[in-house]
């Protein structure tokens, strides 16, 4: 199969004048190389496309693909991850991972938590704050946790994100509103163990690969998996495969959220325990990082003895099940 790969290279955006934090979610060349090499090993022809301007130009020029392996994050707005899938839908080209609705829903952490709460799944009490005035009238018990409503890679999260007083809430919340020009999510602080749960598959066929516990070392910014900790994780953060009862509960919760939100093919769900030791939904990443060595999902697979090419094949096979006309040929190539 001829498989296009859509992505946003961080280096290209940095060269165009964008900032380090602004581009933190975007990909490195070795991620694209890793995906391409895996597709070749599975018997396919990878075609690097790049970001949405390149995709639009190629589509308008008449170029087509049997399927697109989409990891394009975009840069602006709550719909930034939805742009490439929406274009592909318009041209009726199948692609990996979730559709535009799910990507926009999950990127807005408040909207995703509303759906998860309606599903009857545990998530801390929360409010979406749009103005500094909203902060003054907020009625949630302290301690609270404050972060931008639609960012990834822990952008906007620091040791100050946990607030213990009205004064701290007003200061941190107002700063985030101004800095990120988007609403702020305020939720009950979860003091317990934190896991990221890897998932592959779609709907009833989805399954949890395992739970990776996030452990902060003495050199880390304490109490929170912050942007700084994530960006400089070596020597600060370690990731340990967890298999105990709480980890199994976290995987069950994550799988329920994944299916309920309509996520597809592969990704991660972040879970943290409350003061009573109950796992609670934090957020879902249906477009998870796929760097072969440093992305959480790849680290989880390595610790489970799952090869990177196997992970890519699982994602691909899940996507191909949505396109039966292409699926039989694609499955034969991938498994042959």
Image: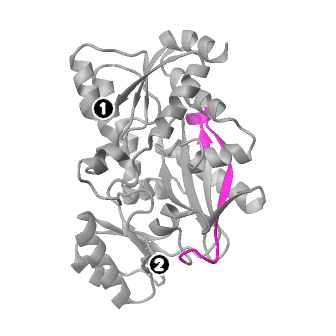
Task: Compute the Cα span from label 2 to label 1.
Answer: 37 Å
Residue in the picture at 59% in, 63% down = 234
Given residues 59 and 82, the one toward you in this image is 59
| Residue 63 higher or lower than 25, as above or below | above
The location of residue 259, given as percent across then percent down, is: 54, 42
Q: Secondary structure at mark 2?
A: helix
Given residues 293 and 137, the one toward you in this image is 293
Given the current orientation, which residue lies at the most extreme front position? 15
The location of residue 130, given as percent across then percent down, is: 25, 69
The location of residue 144, given as percent across then percent down, is: 45, 79
Q: Which residues are magenta?
A: 199-221
Q: Label 2 belongs to which residue?
A: 159
| Residue 171 higher or lower than 75, as above or below | below
The quadrant where residue 51 appears: top left
The location of residue 46, given as percent across then percent down, is: 47, 21
Q: Is residue 137 magenta?
A: no
The quadrant where residue 333 appears: top right
Q: Is residue 74 visible?
A: no
For the residue carrying disc 1, how many other residues have a C-alpha within 10 Å: few (<14), some (14-19), or many (20+)? some
Q: Of the residues under marks 2 and 1, which one precedes in the sequence?
A: 1
Residue in the picture at 43% in, 76% down = 161
Q: Is residue 281 visible?
A: yes
| Disc ID at residue 220 | none
Q: Secondary structure at mark 1?
A: helix
Q: Nearer the viewer, mark 2 or mark 1?
A: 2
| Quadrant of the frame with the C terminus | top right
For the residue carrying disc 2, how many other residues have a C-alpha within 10 Å: few (<14), some (14-19), or many (20+)? some
Q: Label 1 belongs to which residue?
A: 86
Residue in the picture at 34% in, 15% down = 64
């Amino acid at each position: 199969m001829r498989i296009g790969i859509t992505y946003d290279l961080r280096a290209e955006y940095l060269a165009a004048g964008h900032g380090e934090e602004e581009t933190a979610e975007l990909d490195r060349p070795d991620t694209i190389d890793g995906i391409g090499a895996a597709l070749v090993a599975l018997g396919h022809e990878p075609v690097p496309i790049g970001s949405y301007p390149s995709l639009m130009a190629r589509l308008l020029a008449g170029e087509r693909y049997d399927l697109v392996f989409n990891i394009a994050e975009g840069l602006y707005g709550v719909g930034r991850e939805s742009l490439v899938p929406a274009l592909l839908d318009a041209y009726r080209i199948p692609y990996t991972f979730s559709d535009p609705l799910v990507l926009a829903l999950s990127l807005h952490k408040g909207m995703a938590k509303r759906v998860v709460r309606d599903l009857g799944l545990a998530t801390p009490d929360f409010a979406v704050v749009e103005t500094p005035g909203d902060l003054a009238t907020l009625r949630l018990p302290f301690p609270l946790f404050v972060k931008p409503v639609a960012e990834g890679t822990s952008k906007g999260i620091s040791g100050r994100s946990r607030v213990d007083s009205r004064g701290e809430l007003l200061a941190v919340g107002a700063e985030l509103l101004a800095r990120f020009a988007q609403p702020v999510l305020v939720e009950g602080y979860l003091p317990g163990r934190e896991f990221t749960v890897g998932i592959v598959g779609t709907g009833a066929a989805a399954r949890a690969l395992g739970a990776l516990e996030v452990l902060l070392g003495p050199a880390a910014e304490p109490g929170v998996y912050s942007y700084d900790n994530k960006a400089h994780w070596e020597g600060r953060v370690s990731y340990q495969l967890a298999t105990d009862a709480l980890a199994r509960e976290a995987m069950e919760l994550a799988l329920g959220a994944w299916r309920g939100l309509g996520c597809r093919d592969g990704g991660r769900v972040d879970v943290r325990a409350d003061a009573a030791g109950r796992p609670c939904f934090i957020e879902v990443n249906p477009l998870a990082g796929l760097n072969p060595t440093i992305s959480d999902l790849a680290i989880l697979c390595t610790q489970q003895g799952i090869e990177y090419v196997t992970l890519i094949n699982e994602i691909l096979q899940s996507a191909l099940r949505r396109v039966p006309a292409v699926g039989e040929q694609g499955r034969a190539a991938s498994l042959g």
